[in-house]
Image (cartoon, rainbow, N blue to C red):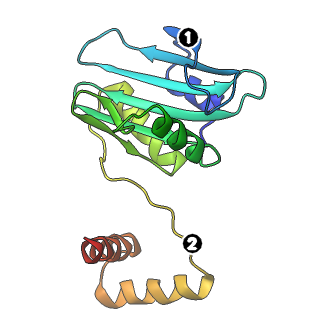
């Protein structure tokens, strides 16, 4: 999970707002910091963390210019977040703002790369990184298969994931 230090570095230590977090899913000492660039078509970043433990519960990217929003919820607290959304009868807990839903990220580096690009106003990769666990034997097998097909390992994995998603639709 992203650390408070990493988040502060991404936002250039510029904090524009802070407040107690209004939900209870992360505990009574949850606090939210925001960093907004002050532009309606700009960007903002948020972090929710425990004031006593410094545990980071959630980080968010709001890219208003491109109408995109990303977040990472600490996996240890995602069930509690979902349960509280249900108890509050929030029908779409993925909504960031009008007609824009959060894209949930799972890889710290993916969040950091997107956040740094958004902050710099640069074009960024909107695909999401997906962690996969392979044994050494499986990794070797798939690397050989990629070589046989004359594609990169990442291209092979991306193709396999897309086909699996299509089969489940």
At a point 61% along the width and 33% down the height, the residue shown is 25
Q: Dot 2: few (<14), some (14–19), or many (≥20) neighbours within 10 Å?
A: few
Q: Secondary structure at mark 1?
A: strand
Residue 130 - label: none
Quarter containing the N terminus: top right
Q: Where residue 87 appears, x then y in whole percent?
A: 50, 36
Quarter containing the C terminus: bottom left
Q: Where residue 7 appears, x then y in whole percent?
A: 56, 28
Residue indicated by mark 2: 133
At a point 39% along the width and 89% down the height, the residue shown is 145
Q: Secondary structure at mark 2?
A: loop
At a point 46% along the width and 40% down the height, the residue shown is 86
Q: Is residue 162 visible?
A: yes
Residue 47 as seen in the image, left or right of residue 56: left
Classify residue 162 by image quadrant: bottom left
Classify residue 166 by image quadrant: bottom left
Residue indicated by mark 1: 18
Q: Dot 1: few (<14), some (14–19), or many (≥20) neighbours within 10 Å?
A: some
Furthest residue to the right?
52
Q: Where residue 30 appears, x then y in whole percent?
A: 65, 23
In the foreground, 133 or 83: 83
State the CA–CA distance, disc 2 to disc 1: 38 Å
Give the answer, above or below, for where 18 lies relative to 58: above
In the foreground, 54 or 42: 54
Residue 149 as seen in the image, left or right of residue 22: left
In the foreground, 126 or 59: 59
Callout 2 touching callout 1 (CB < 8 Å): no
Q: Of the residues under marks 2 and 1, which one precedes in the sequence?
A: 1
Residue 156 as seen in the image, left or right of residue 33: left
Classify residue 26 by image quadrant: top right
In the foreground, 4 or 153: 4
Q: Is residue 112 visible?
A: no
């Amino acid at each position: 999970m992203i650390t408070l230090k990493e988040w502060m570095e991404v936002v250039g230590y510029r904090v524009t707002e802070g407040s107690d977090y209004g939900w209870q899913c992360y505990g009574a000492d949850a606090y939210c910091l925001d960093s907004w660039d002050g532009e309606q078509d700009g960007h903002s970043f948020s972090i929710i963390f425990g004031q006593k433990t410094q545990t980071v519960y959630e980080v968010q990217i709001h890219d208003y210019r491109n109408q995109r929003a990303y977040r990472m919820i600490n996996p240890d607290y995602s069930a509690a977040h979902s349960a509280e959304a249900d108890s509050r009868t929030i029908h779409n807990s993925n909504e960031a703002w009008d007609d824009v839903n959060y894209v949930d990220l799972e890889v710290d580096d993916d969040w950091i790369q997107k956040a740094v690009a958004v902050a710099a106003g640069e074009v960024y990769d909107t695909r999401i990184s997906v962690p996969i666990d392979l044994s050494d034997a499986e990794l070797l097998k798939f690397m050989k298969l990629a070589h046989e097909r004359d594609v990169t390992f990442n291209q092979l994995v991306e193709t396999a994931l897309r086909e699996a998603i299509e089969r489940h639709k």
